[in-house]
Image (cartoon, helix red, strand yellow):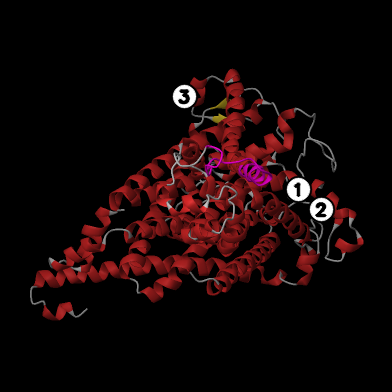
Amino acid sequence: MSNTPDSESRATGARLTSATLSPAERPSLQKRWSLTTLKEQCIRLVLFCCALLSVATTAGIILVLFSETLLFFSQVSVLSFFGDTVWQPQSQDNPRFGIWPLACGTFLVAGIAGLIGMPLGLLSALYLSEYASERSRSYLKPTLEVLAGIPSIVYGYFALVFLTPYVLQPIFMNALGFEVGGFNVLSAGIVVGIMIVPTISSLSEDVLRSVPRGLREAGLALGSTKFDVSVRIVLPAALSGIMAAFLLALSRAVGETMAVTIAAGSQPDLSLNVLRSIETMTAYIVMVSLGEAAAGSIEYRSLYVVAMSLFLITLVMNIIARFILRRYRNVYQ
Amino acid sequence: MNETAFSTDPQLAARHRWGRMFEWACAIATWLCLLILATMLLGVFIKGWPHLNWGFLTHFDSQIEPETAGIKAGLWGSFWLIVLTALFAIPVGIGAAVYLEEYAKANWVTRLIQLNILNLAGVPSVVYGILGVTVFGHMFGLFGDWPREPVWHLPFGDKVLTGALTLSLLILPVVIISTQEALRSIPASLRHSSLALGATQWQTIRYQVLPASLPGILTGIILALSRAVGESAPLIMIGALTYVSSTPGNIGSVTDFFTKPQGIVEAPFDRFTAMPLVIYNWASQPDEIYQSLSAAGIVVLLLVLLLMNTTAVIIRQRFQNWIRW
């Protein structure tokens, strides 16, 4: 501002180049240091640190889990961790740390949740994006989202107090003659399945809606029915995005804690019987935390190992899902 | 469907029948989810009804007389947790989002941070619990043992502060992502006109972008905080108690804020329980009365969540009419 060129050079403003002005009068575009720019830089730095905190969190998680995992594996061999089929960390004379019973519990619950949640979520996504009127969509969608907002402890309570005694036990015990425990995998799987419906339906719906209108219209113009358009054209076009939604939802089911702890109990067992109690990885972590395992003991360290496995499983699922979603977006946008 | 009127071809009629059946299946799936939601809420409400009175909110948990047990300790514990969590998570979350949206250049550092936030949002809450207990609770054992009494020194142990810090880390990705979305919805022309008038970048953010995106940011924050209210696993991990008969800082009513001001300072360093923990404790007792108490606790928890979500909706609608681009 201070280097306003004189009137003569303003008249020939079009040719205002460094040749016509001496170096001192040249309007500088270079940043000058002042209190304001210093303040700006400080604010920028503080904000950058805020963003960096998220990286620090990840680093913290990995550091904490990794260091204790290493200590654990200095006492228990990796081979027995992946090879043994019995998980009894509390045992005084013969503690055994085979991850499979816990892994079996986790995948059993996630599997049932997937069987319940994936069809329900996909069908409701199809309904919302292809069939429902704009009006009914406007209230159905937020109501479905409520399911995601309910704390998982409520789902656990529902499974334990309503689902098992009033639905599962009459059907499986009284009608079919199976033994149904008060804690059972099936009830936990069902409620976790309901819990992941909103994740699947809202993600899949976004994906379905982003399928270009032209594809639908082309299908209809060729004489397809609405069913053909939805199932044979839109669904295959959106398939990769839907797979990503399934993966994200399943990783949520794997990490789900309280509902599973309450409903499925804490009986580490390598079995596929869904009517009995079982212990998942998350439930084991909660159970040890509730007890009085001394810090530094092998039982306490096993906590970190289980958490590490859980972290890695969900991380891999998440990364694959994000990767698929990004590729999908590149195709249609 | 009027198409069927034209179809004399039996094959086409069959296809339309299929189509209608499929549409019905989709509709039933959607409504089934809502039906389950309704059953769940109604069932819990009916089960908890006998205990839903004012005394439930003002009494402590009791093992001798479960008839008079209440959720007071959990209610106040959750209150302190949420206030402190908001205190930590809101500035950091907004700061990170502002950096990523307004300042960051598109380079590998930014991509790393962005990817990292997305992945953090998918980390199970128990893992955050482990991080919390190790970093805030024990502080890696650098400062001696786990304290049992209210502390003024490190490490924080199983106190409100540990819980709040852990929950802050847990909801931080959610806060950042929703704030970023709110900032993204502000048109670039607003920034350009502010910068063109000579405002610095921070002045533009502080006086134009943030006020304009405030409703979106607030909505996201409230939703993230309501996730924190219902979270129980990380709190169990950090060693929060499920049975306490005191409130943090001994503040048990609104008037206590004025009569016992020292309690406000003591509360973050006090032992605590939270509503989901009390509910969990009751739900894991076999007696019928505890099941019913648990249901009553869930109703209170859901009412708190409903209150928070309604606030979010009201804020969004108010401001939507206020700001027009």
Mark 2 — residue? B248
Under circle 3, the secondary element is helix
Q: Which of marks 2 and 1 is nearer the N terminus?
A: 1
The subunit letter for the residue under badge 1 reads B
Q: Give the range drawn in magenta.
A: A23-44
Q: Is residue A269 left or right of residue B64?
A: left
> Which is closer to the viewer, label 3 or label 1?
1
Instruction: Name the residue carrying label 3.
Output: A83
Residue A88, horizontal then vertical, whole percent: 59, 30
State yes or no: discs 2 and 1 in contact (Cβ < 8 Å): yes
Instruction: Describe residue B216's horizontal placement relative to residue A113 as left or right.
Output: right
Determine if residue B239 is in view.
yes
> Which amino acid type is marked by label 3?
Gly
Q: Which mark is residue B160?
A: 1
How far separated are the C-alphas under marks 3 and 1? 41 Å
Query: At label 2, which amino acid type do we have?
Result: Pro
User: Residue A279, relative to residue A201: is it above or below?
Assistant: above
Foreground of the two, A235 or B105:
B105
**Are labels 2 and 1 on one chain?**
yes
Please name the residue shown 73% across and 34% down the image. B138
